[in-house]
Structures are given as structure tokens and as C-alpha cells.
């Protein structure tokens, strides 16, 4: 198998599925991190209100 990110591989279409999987995983991780941060933000606001 040739190098993962070479242009030739992308043009032949062999590594496109791997590339798509990589992108999907990155997006999913980003969204789960975003949701996690949002939930933490809400929890922080709630605990602030409780302490006040």
C-alpha cells in the first residue's frame, strides 16, 4: 500500500474510503468534544447559581 495521504492514492480511489473514515472520525470526535464542553459549561453555570 502506498503512502496514506499521497495525491496518487486519492486519485485512484483506493484510499478515499480510509480518508472518509478519517474525516468522519475527526468530525465525530470534534462534535463529542463540543457537546462535552457545552455540558460542562451548563454544569458550571448551575454550580455557580447554587453557590450564590
Image: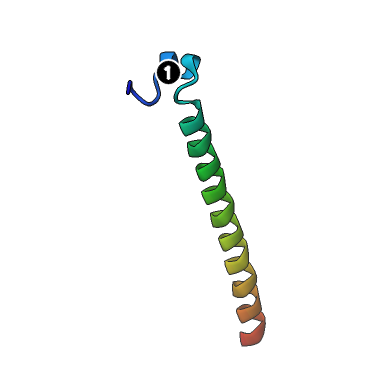
Q: Quadrant of the C terminus?
A: bottom right
Q: Position of residue 47 (x, y in %)?
A: 61, 80
Q: Position of residue 45 (x, y in %)?
A: 64, 73
Residue 7 location, x and y as percent? 44, 15
Task: Kindly tell me whether residue 52 is visible in this rendering.
Answer: no
In the rendered image, the residue lying farthest to the bottom is 51
Q: Residues within 10 Å of mark 1 (few under 14, many from 20)?
A: some
**Within the image, what quadrant is residue 14 found in?**
top left
Q: Is residue 19 above or below residue 37?
A: above
**How many labels, in total?**
1
Q: Residue at x 67, y 81 (%)?
A: 49
Q: Residue placed at 62% from the left, 62% from the top?
A: 38
Q: Nearer the viewer, residue 52 or 6?
A: 6
Is residue 50 rendered to the left or right of residue 5?
right
Rendered view: 13 above or below 51: above
Disc 1 target residue: 9
- Left or right relative to 38: residue 10: left
Q: Nearer the viewer, residue 37 or 23?
A: 23
Question: Helix, strand or loop at disc 1?
Answer: helix
Amino acid at each position: 500500500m502506498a503512502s496514506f495521504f499521497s495525491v496518487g492514492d486519492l486519485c485512484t480511489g483506493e484510499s478515499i474510503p480510509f480518508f472518509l473514515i478519517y474525516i468522519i472520525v475527526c468530525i465525530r470526535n470534534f462534535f463529542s468534544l463540543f457537546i462535552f464542553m457545552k455540558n460542562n459549561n451548563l454544569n458550571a453555570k448551575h454550580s455557580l447559581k447554587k453557590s450564590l
